[in-house]
Amino acid sequence: MKTNRVPIFFIILSFLVMLPPAAASVLTDSFHKSISKAESIEKVTLDNVNGDCHFFLAPENGNLDIDAKVTIKGPSDEECESYYQKVKIDVTRENHVLKIVVTRPRSVSFFGLGNSIRMSVDFEISIPVPMDVSVDLVNGDVNVEAMKRCSVDVVNGDVHMKGIAGASVEAVNSCIDIRDVKEWVVIDAVNGNLNLVSASPDLEKIKVEFVNGSMTVQIPTASVGRLNMDSATGTADLKERKDGKTWETRMHGKRIHVSDKGKAKISLENVNGKITLLCD
């Protein structure tokens, strides 16, 4: 009987941690900062805990604009206000890098239990010219459009990228959607799904490693060079478009290895899940 008590305890503890606190009060505020002469900035980094973020191209005024919405939920107005007074959004510029860091009060709760305050900071960041972007986030969705190299490290949250040069993603629980990538993609994920589409003739590398989830990758046939597809408990399918309309399976199995004339090195590995490569 005693051997079952520890697992049950952790199951109950995990359930309690997932329960949101009963918030009687909500405090919201906005943050705005505009960076002029942003053309000398080459990279923007964001370090946050909870909250979505959206990076997009907006070259109208030539400034780099940071807009954020702060939301704090707690049992009373006084506690929310006290918490908010300790929150900082620091924007610093070091050489060619702009750093955005959200600092929040430290929690002394046990596994989040007893912590009656919850805070999220959602960002909208408009950038005048394509730059490198780096995001370090625990809970929240990431959306990046029309940038150069993009690096995302997220625990819980979906990742959307479109019109980028290269992407690096590390995720635990995430659905990843990448469109119009030009040169390379490297992904290491635990749980989730991947949809990756590119028509670029300049593809050089696609490397994806999943533990649980399915992945679908669509690229030009001419880009395929050295190809490795490996699914431990699922299946791997290499499909080509037939007559410009329907997809026809060219190869099927757990492991697929191909050496072709393209320059892209492609490695798709999955422990539990299906791999589909569509060559158009």
Image (tube, rainbow, N blue to C red):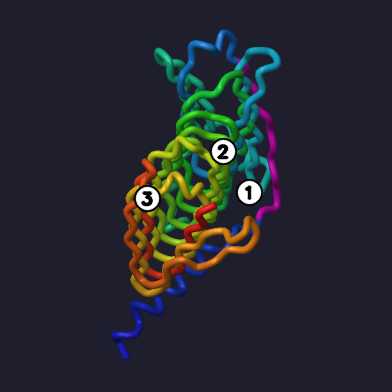
**Residue 273, image x, y percentages:** 44, 69
* Image disc number at residue 257: none
Q: Is residue 56 found left or right of 98 in the rendered image? A: right
The residue depicted at 36 percent of the width and 71 percent of the height is 254
Frontmost of labels 3 and 1 is 3
Element on which disc 2 rests: helix
Q: Image height check: is 14 above or below 86?
A: below
Under mark 1, the amino acid is Gly
Instruction: First in sequence, mark 3 or 2: give its number.
Output: 2
Q: Nearer the viewer, residue 86 or 194?
A: 194
Residue receiving disc 2: 83
Q: Image height check: is 175 above or below 201?
A: below
In the displayed orientation, state which residue is furthest to the bottom. Answer: 1
In the displayed orientation, state which residue is furthest to the front. Answer: 243
Q: Image height check: is 168 above or below 44?
A: below
Please give the count of numbered marks on the rendered protein: 3
**Residue 141, image x, y percentages:** 57, 46
Q: Which residues are magenta?
A: 23-34
The residue depicted at 45 percent of the width and 41 percent of the height is 152
**Residue 106, image x, y percentages:** 44, 41
Instruction: First in sequence, mark 1 or 2: give its number.
Output: 1
Q: Is residue 78 found left or right of 97 in the rendered image? A: right
Residue receiving disc 3: 266
Q: Main secondary structure of the magenta part?
A: strand
Give the Cα separation between the discs numbered 3 and 1: 48 Å
The residue depicted at 70 percent of the width and 45 percent of the height is 26
Element on which disc 3 rests: strand
Residue 66 shows in this picture: yes
Residue receiving disc 1: 74
Under mark 2, the amino acid is Tyr
Q: Nearer the viewer, residue 138 or 233?
A: 233
